[in-house]
Amino acid sequence: MNDRAIRKPGPDHPIVIEPSWTHVIVTVAGRAIVDTRKALVLREAKYPPILYVPRSDADMALLLRSELTSYCPYKGDCCYFDIPIGGDKSKNAVWTYEAPYPAVAEIKEHLAFYPDRVDSMGES
């Protein structure tokens, strides 16, 4: 049985997802992991905004699923990916919600990156 609390965004914990309208390129070890103009920006409560990029615009062959998992009561179960070409710096560098809760369904099939675990995460 799943005893995890499921919370819905609201005035006390808002979550807004919208197109970022920027060109996002993520690189590691001189390789482009992502090149997209279809990123989403997720703004959650008082946290910094997070870019979510479509998996279809990521080179998934450069990612390796990690054993790390986590849970967010607003978004659901989260899994992580390493970027092996980045070495130890790029372990668990990427996260994704493969079956996000309905309130954040737009982030399904999207990835987010820790900026300090990649070489660059440029927006233009």
Image (tube, rainbow, N blue to C red):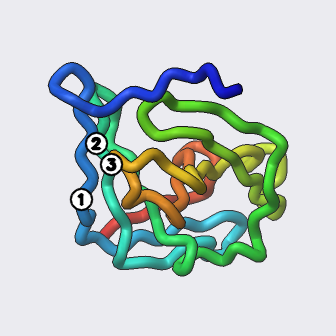
C-alpha gap between disc 2 and disc 1: 9 Å
What residue is shown at x 42% (from left), y 64% (from top)? 122
Residues tagged 2 and 3 counted as in contact (Cβ below 8 A)? yes
Q: How many marks?
A: 3
Amino acid identity at mark 2: Arg
Asked if labels 1 and 2 touch by Cβ distance under 8 angstroms, the answer is yes
Above or below for 81 versus 71 = below
Residue at the disc numbered 2: 43
Q: Residue beneath label 1, please?
A: 18
Q: Secondary structure at mark 1?
A: strand
Describe residue 78's horizontal placement relative to residue 36 as left or right: right
In-front residue for pair 22/46: 46
Q: Seen from this angle, which residue lies furthest left?
A: 11
Residue on which the image places disc 3: 42
* Structural distance between the alpha carbons of marks 2 and 3: 4 Å
Badge 2 crowding class, 10 Å Cα cut-off, few under 14, some 14 to 19, many 20 or more, is some
Distance Cα–Cα, label 1 vs label 3 = 7 Å
Q: Residue at x 70, y 48 (%)?
A: 80
